[in-house]
Image (cartoon, grey):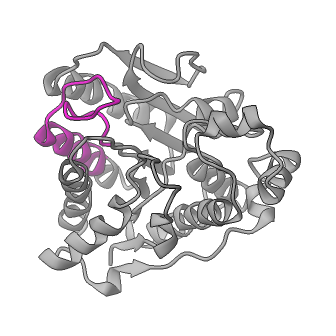
Amino acid sequence: MLKVAWSPVYAHPLPEGHRFPMEKYNLIPEQLLYEGTLTQANFFEPAIQSEEDILTTHSADYFRKLQTQTLTTKEARKIGFPQSEELVLRERIINQGTLSCAHYARAHGVAMNVSGGTHHAFADRGEGFCLLNDIATAANVLLRDQIAHRILIVDLDVHQGNGTAAIFNDRTDVFTFSMHCAGNYPMDKETSHLDIALPPGTTDELFLSQLKATLPRLIDQFQPDFAFYLSGVDVLATDKLGRMAMTREGCKQRDRFVMETMKSTGIPLTISMGGGYSPHIKDIVEAHCNTFRLAAEIWG
């Protein structure tokens, strides 16, 4: 059965005037339930991630600052959210959602987090709406517990996964692959094991051709036994932050290729949703829902 992490705290309200689209975290499961793609049995509510697991990836000093809301003004500004206990709790639950999904993926082939994809969080700081790095933490826990030994992270969000790249920069047991828009946030890029920077205005054809020429080769060379996929929909032409020109159908073909490739090679896959900032919430929700529909179709 396809297992999906979701919690009411995912849609934790932000101060009035903050334009981050938190409402999508309720609308995605509501739509999938309404249309019958998923049932309540597919969903589980994650627990709060332990400090021990968080410290596999993040520094003790940084985590203490988050817990006590003692980030400097500059540090908080880099994240983009106001400091609060509720926000840190939300992030810990999102992190645990991705880790729990990884365990489900081992059993069922795939599992999905309605949130996550917090790839701008570094070991010692947060950036770009990301406090704790859910995929990096899940990967480190799997490696620590010897549940996986070689992990591939496929990051197809429109923004480079700079935090993830920095965390695993000198590692040989994790391979970070980021395909993103050049000239977009973050302006100062980190170095992934493989970065493909696509030009602004990239269409479905260019994006898909690059992906199809790259992903099977990486799997053949690296031989991962587990994979994480960040499936951001900020690659859409409608996105106000993305600067790319993909259609919803192209985004769907991207997801299908990643999923079918992983299933055909027998690699368990955990998917985090990542970004999406189109002005009309329906564009964000529909593109994200396509990812869930495909997983339900491909894994039955």
Q: Camera-side residue: 70 or 267?
A: 70
> Residue 191 placed where, x, y %?
59, 20
> Residue 204 placed where, x, y %?
16, 28
* Left or right for 45, reference 3: right
123 to 184, vertically: above or below: below
Q: Camera-side residue: 87 or 296?
A: 87
Please indicate, yes or no, whether residue 173 appears anywhere in the rendered image: no
* Left or right for 268, reference 283: right
* Residue 271 shown in magenta: no
Number of numbered callouts drawn: 0
Residue 236: quadrant of the picture: top left
Which portion, as a residue range, is magenta?
Answer: 233-261
> Residue 190 placed where, x, y %?
60, 21
Please indicate, yes or no, whether residue 18 appears anywhere in the rendered image: yes
199 to 160, vertically: above or below: above
Residue at far right of view = 61
Q: Which residue is rendered at x = 47% and y = 71% of the image?
A: 104
* Left or right for 5, reference 205: right
Give the quadrant of the N terminus: bottom left
Give the quadrant of the C terminus: bottom left
